[in-house]
Amino acid sequence: MMRQLSYATRALAAAATLALPAVVSAQADNRPIVVVFSFDNNAIGKDHADYDGMSKGVQDLLITDLAANGKIRLVDRARLQDLLAEQNLATTKVVDQATAIRVGHMLGAQYAITGGFITDGRSQTRLDSHVIDMETSQISSPQSVMGKTDDVLGLIAQLSSKVSGSLNLAPKPGAEHRMGDAGKTGAKTATQSGGQASPAVRAAVAAENFAKPSSRQAVRAVKLDIATMKIYSNALDEMDKKNNTQAIKLLTEVHNKFPDFDPARRNLEKLGQKVSH
């Protein structure tokens, strides 16, 4: 009996020892948290409304590209969307600075990236962005890129590189381990009691709130035209509305046209679809 108890105790201690580095690593991760909001539609002309859906597409693909920057943590777009829905802001087309700061605080972010896009509907598109400091409300790092509408993804990659190159973000004291209400909700559910979640649970919940890095080179290699970008953006909107059947239809259309476009594949898999690589 004593021998069995001793073995069980040693096994439990060994498991705890193996798990500890991962938990400590997650807890010690003090890279600044950045949230990217949907981009404003500033399209020119009578077809302005046709480009409303692109706001989410630009946001999503900028997050995907920036997630490869190991110096920051990007809030996952789906997590942001869930919080906006809870705050009855999911249908808001333009997020002003005050709203961005309030929602950013709730997500535990220290910095927010907002911006807009302009297209003439024919051949030219411009993307603009800037960074908001959640603590000081200061706006900095204005960036702008312009190019052809037949390679919107290339434009987003350019903007991402300029944003990454200009960022000098430092963690804010006391904000390293919090993910605001988004993290607290998951931790409470995991404990099934409303009590304090364990370090392992908090680490797991926090990890789920961040965008996972994708292959930057692979994504950037795809020359995504503005028409396909609108389809992909509309698919994201359908996902947010929980219209999964329509989202799958649109994502499949994008995937069939651009099989190497990883974001479409990953979202199809999120919706339970088996996709060939």
Image (cartoon, grey):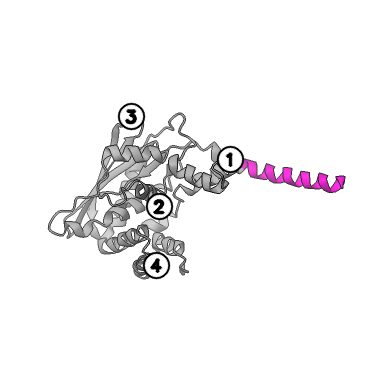
Q: Earlier in the sequence, mark 4 or mark 3?
A: 3
221 left or right of 125 in image: right
Q: Is residue 268 above or below residue 192?
A: below
Instruction: Estimate how packed mark 4 is, as few (under 14), some (14 to 19) or many (20 or more) residues with alpha carbons within 10 Å.
Output: some
Query: At which x and y percent is residue 2?
Result: 86, 45
Q: Earlier in the sequence, mark 2 or mark 1?
A: 2
Residue position marked by numbered label 4 in the rendering = 259
Quadrant of res 108: top left
Q: Earlier in the sequence, mark 1 or mark 4?
A: 1
* Spatial separation of the CA atoms under disc 4 and disc 2: 23 Å
Amino acid type of the residue tagged 2 in the rendering = Ala
Instruction: Estimate how packed mark 2 is, as few (under 14), some (14 to 19) or many (20 or more) residues with alpha carbons within 10 Å.
Output: some
Amino acid type of the residue tagged 3 in the rendering = Thr
Please identify the dominant SS of the magenta region: helix
Query: At which x and y percent is residue 59?
Result: 33, 51
Q: Nearer the viewer, residue 266 or 101?
A: 101
* Spatial separation of the CA atoms under disc 2 and disc 3: 26 Å
Amino acid type of the residue tagged 4 in the rendering = Pro
Magenta residue span: 1-21
* Spatial separation of the CA atoms under disc 4 and disc 3: 43 Å
Residue position marked by numbered label 1 in the rendering = 199
